[in-house]
Amino acid sequence: MGQTAGDEGQKTEGSDPLSAAAAYDGDSACIGDARHVATGFLTEVQAVHGLPVSERAMGMTEVVVSELVTNAVKYAPGPVMLGLQINQGAVRVSVWDSDPVLPDVAATDPQRVGRHGLEITLAVCQGYEVHREPVGKCVTALIALADDPGGRIAGRTAP
């Protein structure tokens, strides 16, 4: 399954059947669509390619996509790009936005309402990275497809 990077979530056939991408104009309506793209992609990975995708992986991918795209819409003006890729038993979720400011986790405050998206993402993923691009930044999270009590993906331990 491929996605074209100019048609908000429209499917196209790509050369790599284990990746998908979508581009959005950055309004809040894209958050739900990005979740649907992610769950559709993982459903296809499981049904067509026979890779195991646990219910936990499906749910956590949906949560991470929602949180990362929400942050991009909220803090960066303009377009947002979502990339999904299967890599060594995990789904790699990448979200690009136009703001070069790198995200940070807010100080712990049980009274704080909101600003928990990055905390949630870090708690449920096995890998996380963020880097500046020539324009903006790209935030990437790695989520194991299969349940594993040891939290291992291809020989790496979870943070």
Image (spheres, rainbow, N blue to C red):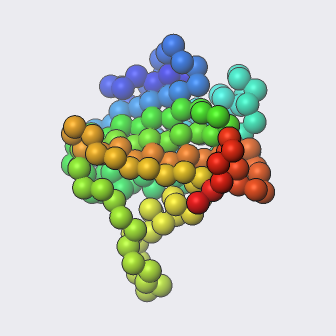
For the point 76% across and 56% down, the residue is: 150
Residue 86 horizontal/vertical position (percent): 59, 32
For the point 39% across and 78% down, the residue is: 107
Residue 14 horizontal/vertical position (percent): 49, 15
Q: Foreground: 115 or 102?
A: 102
Residue 115 horizontal/vertical position (percent): 39, 69
Q: Is residue 66 above or below residue 37?
A: below
Image position of 15 (left or right of 156): left
Q: Is residue 79 above or below residue 114?
A: above
> Which quadrant: the N terminus?
top right
Q: Is residue 29 above or below residue 49?
A: below
For the point 45% across and 68% down, the residue is: 116
> Is there any visible trace of residue 59 in the rendered image?
no
Number of numbered discs overlaid on the protein picture:
0
> Which quadrant: the C terminus?
bottom right
The part of the image, by quadrant, that contains residue 111 is bottom left
Q: Looking at this rendering, what residue extends furthest in the front direction? A: 155
> Is there any visible trace of residue 52 in the rendered image?
yes
The part of the image, by quadrant, that contains residue 118 is bottom left
The part of the image, by quadrant, that contains residue 138 is top left
For the point 41% across and 32% down, the residue is: 22
Residue 61 horizontal/vertical position (percent): 58, 47
Q: Looking at this rendering, what residue extends furthest in the bottom direction? A: 111
